[in-house]
Amino acid sequence: MAGGDGERRRRHSSGAMVPLALLIGEEARMEKMERPRIRYGCAAQSKKGEDYFLIRTDCCRVLGDPSSSFSVFAVLDGHNGNAAAIYTRDNLLNHVMGAIPHGLGREEWLQALPRALVAGFVKTDKEFQRKGQTSGTTVTFVIIDGWTITVASVGDSRCILDAQGGVISALTVDHRLEENVEERERVTASGGEVGRLSIVGGAEIGPLRCWPGGLCLSRSIGDMDVGEFIVPVPYVKQIKLLKAGGRLIIASDGIWDALTSDMAANSCRGLPAELAARQVVKEALRTRGLKDDTTCIVVDITQTDQSSEPPPSTPKKVNRLKSFIFRRKPKDSVNKLAKKLSAVGVVEELFEEGSAMLAERLGNDSSAEKTSNVFTCAICQAILVPSKGVSVHAGSIFSTNSKPWEGPFLCDDCRNKKDAMEGKRPSGVKVL
Ligand SMILES: [Zn+2]
């Protein structure tokens, strides 16, 4: 704890002895100041009744300890029914938390989140499919702990950040076959067919879709009737806001089909969160009419000692970075923009990964054997008989450096799912 001692010495450079109780009290105050104020608003207009959302501001990292609190905000846009969206809203958070090892400190917990989000999304997909119901859903799932924001998403419900100073950036990638070349190639390589809808006379219309099923998305939860190459593995991004704070806008495609990220952010600047969410929905409806379910959550993350005034109504200066922002931009330009954001000191980039391959997302882990004789499936957390678990790296071309007998391990069921997602066996055929 050399760093901590250095801090104390700087703050008490007079050389006087400082009672321990005072130091502890001071650290508690520092911790309190470290935590931003979170204000939020939500608005929605329903057309098909398939949009859902989740807002939880009372979650605790350590059970019963309010000082370990974090918040969750999610938007889910269902298709072909609402069962997948409702099931995901009600179970995803538990599945993610269940994948984080117990007893971690805050920093380790935050580091474990990206991997737990992958496990939680895949487990939710698997459990929902077990129910035998059709329908699928997009998920944009945001966890805010202190100034650290972790976003995981499948589908095309987007989360954007309007940082103080008027720099707007996307924290998600759209998983749509039409715009996302990388995803199109992955789906095709895994055995899916991508094409447009053919009408009588042979003309092709509409966006690129995946066949069978005709889905425009390349990732979702549910959709067991579409094909397992429509995977639930989320794009995950983790950033830390530098103390000025910012505003998140999380919304379904009812908003993004009508408004660019810039338009959405600009339309509600200066309004408190509750009014801002309503204003974004209003602006989308004004532009395009009510063509689709339209849901918007606005979250303001600000310093607690700041007055309750909303962010300034105009950016301090027009930022050159804005020219980088396009609707439905491919992953590369998102990355470039994010790097620029880091460069100008708006955010600190902590983590970003979008691969659909589980071997890459679950990483290497030999701790399972070390900690106890019991080890669990990295996806569903089922307890594995030592002879039964299969390493996530076994037979994977993506991990030539790692040993197939090293963890993390998967149960037979999750191994089947992994193979199906990667197109290694036909969808729906179980290997027994
Ligand atoms: Zn499993």
Image (spheres, rainbow, N blue to C red):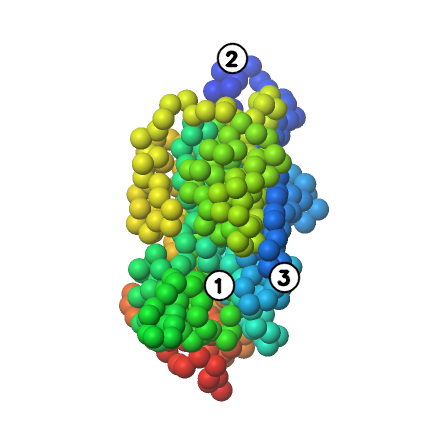
Residues 19 and 425: in front is: 425
Residue at label 3?
A: 86
Q: Position of residue 425 (x, y in %)?
A: 39, 81
State the CA–CA distance, disc 1 to disc 3.
Answer: 14 Å
Residue placed at 38% from the left, 56% from the top?
Answer: 354
- Amino acid, disc 1: Ser
- First-in-chain label (2 vs 1): 2
- Amino acid, disc 3: Ile
State the CA–CA distance, disc 2 to disc 1.
Answer: 59 Å
Q: Secondary structure at mark 2?
A: loop
Q: Secondary structure at mark 3?
A: helix
Residue placed at 46% from the left, 46% from the top?
Answer: 258
> Quick check: can you spot residue 278?
yes
Residues 423 and 100: in front is: 423
Residue at label 1?
A: 220
Identify whether 214 is placed above or below 293: below
- First-in-chain label (3 vs 2): 2
Q: Position of residue 157 (x, y in %)?
A: 49, 52
Residue placed at 43% from the left, 62% from the top?
Answer: 217
Residue placed at 33% from the left, 52% from the top?
Answer: 330
State the CA–CA distance, disc 3 to disc 2.
Answer: 59 Å
Q: Is mark 2 within 8 Å of ligand 1?
A: no
